[in-house]
Structure formats: C-alpha cells, structure tokens
Image (tube, grey):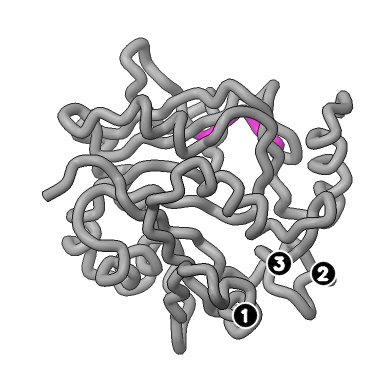
Amino acid sequence: MRHTPASLMLFAAGYGTRMRPLTDTLPKPLIEVAGKPLLTHAMEQVAHMPDLKVVANAHYKADQIVDYFAGTGVMVNREAPDLLDTGGGLRNALPLLGDGPVFTMNTDAVWNGPSALECLAQAWDPERMDALLLGVPPEHALGHAGQGDFSVDAEGRAARGPGLIYSGVQILQTKELLEIEDSVFSLNALWDRMIVRERLFILPYPGQWCDVGRPENIAMAEAMLRGEDV
C-alpha cells in the first residue's frame, strides 16, 4: 500500500444554507469570488500537484457540478438519495480514490499564500500520523469567529481546544472509515479516535485564508486576494 497521497477528495455536495439566497440557484462551490467560482479557487491549489487523481462529490444541484467538471478528468461521485456528510461521503468515494492516504479539501474558502496541498505533503509523516490537518492561526483567518478548533503541542499533535482553525484541507488515512457503522457521519468521528491514539496532527498555514461560508464574506475574501488590509 502506498504511504503518500495520490488522490484528492473535493467536498462539493452540501446545501450551502448559510449562503442563501445565492444558493437558491447555484450550489455553493459555484458561487464566484473575484470573478471565479469557488471550485476554480480550489482547483488552483490542485494545479501545484498535477498528478493527483481528483474526485468531487455532488448532491445539491449535482448536475451543475457535473457540468463544471466536464472534460477536465475530475470524477464526480453523486450522493443519492441522501447527503452523507464528510465521513460518509469520503467512504462512498473510496472505490474512485484508491487505497492509502488521501487529501481532502472543502470548497468554501480561498487562500493567499503557498499551496495548501504542498504544505501538507512536505510535512506528512505516515509513521507518526493518521491525519495531518492544515490549521490557520486566528490572526491569519478571515470570515471565521472563535478562538480556533484545535490546540497543538510542541510535536504538532492536535487536541480539541482553542488554537488553530481547521482550514478544510488535510491528509487522512482512510482505512478506519470502514470501521464506522453509520452511513452518514462526519470526519470528526475519525479525528476523535485519532486524538485518543495521539495520531492526529495539525500544521499551521503560513499565509492567509478566508472562509467563504456567508454572502458577506465574499467581499472580505476579494479584499484579501487584492492584498488589502481586512
């Protein structure tokens, strides 16, 4: 079995309820920021690693996601009849992603800095890690309230608590997905198991990141991309 990720899961299936009314007619990943759909911003991260196999899930307004990726080589895995959440969606896509660790990426953020995927790839150590999350210090995160999702110790291990904000990008070992009985579940279920075993790690991102989860965050993200103080 390979030990470095060769595939990427893009989460693009959600309803985008916080982005209404924009998502009344569009799936959230196709909402534009700085003249480009959020999916295009995500794929710009992938451009730094052109050999990755890419799979996107789709549920809400899935035909639009399929049309976006037509002719690109990205495989779209439809979730029907139910939305499976992040853990269930990833497990459902494993036949397309293949064995071994995978990258996963949410599609509701934009970045101003080095490639998120390359940052993770350079720090990945499968001997110590079952997952490596990319976290953002609160002072470098826009559009996100709170004190962070994970604390981090001197060796990079993650625990629940104030500290770094999860950016939506990670490398994850997938074999444990098969041990969860529920069909609909969050990746939080895996992370909690890994925390107990001290196998969940988090890496600080050195650039800026903006959560585009609400309509008012679009202008904030565009200002960040222009290099303006926000």
Check disc 2 and report the residue beneath it: 22
Between discs 2 and 1, the one toward the N terminus = 2
Q: CA distance from mark 3 to mark 1?
A: 11 Å
**Highlighted range, magenta:** 144-149
Residue drawn at the location 50% of the way across and 23% of the way down: 204
Front residue of this view, candidates 28 and 148: 28
Q: Nearer the viewer, mark 3 or mark 1?
A: 1
Q: Around disc 3, counting alpha carbons within 10 Å, would you say few (fewer than 14), some (14 to 19), or many (20 or more)?
A: many
What percent of the width, then of the height, locates residue 145?
70, 36
Between discs 3 and 2, the one toward the N terminus = 2
Front residue of this view, candidates 82 and 9: 9
Amino acid on which disc 3 is placed = Leu
The picture quadrant where one finds residue 28 is bottom right
Q: Around disc 1, counting alpha carbons within 10 Å, would you say few (fewer than 14), some (14 to 19), or many (20 or more)?
A: few
Check disc 1 and report the residue beneath it: 67
Q: How many labels, in total? A: 3
Residue drawn at the location 62% of the way across and 80% of the way down: 67
Q: CA distance from mark 2 to mark 1?
A: 19 Å
Q: Which type of secondary structure does the marked residue at label 1 adopt?
A: helix
What percent of the width, then of the height, locates residue 203?
44, 26
Amino acid on which disc 2 is placed = Leu
Residue 30: which disc? 3
Residue 87: which disc? none
Q: CA distance from mark 3 to mark 2?
A: 10 Å
| Contact between labelled residues 1 and 3, with CB atoms less than 8 Å apart | no
Q: Nearer the viewer, mark 2 or mark 1?
A: 1
Q: Nearer the viewer, mark 3 or mark 2?
A: 3
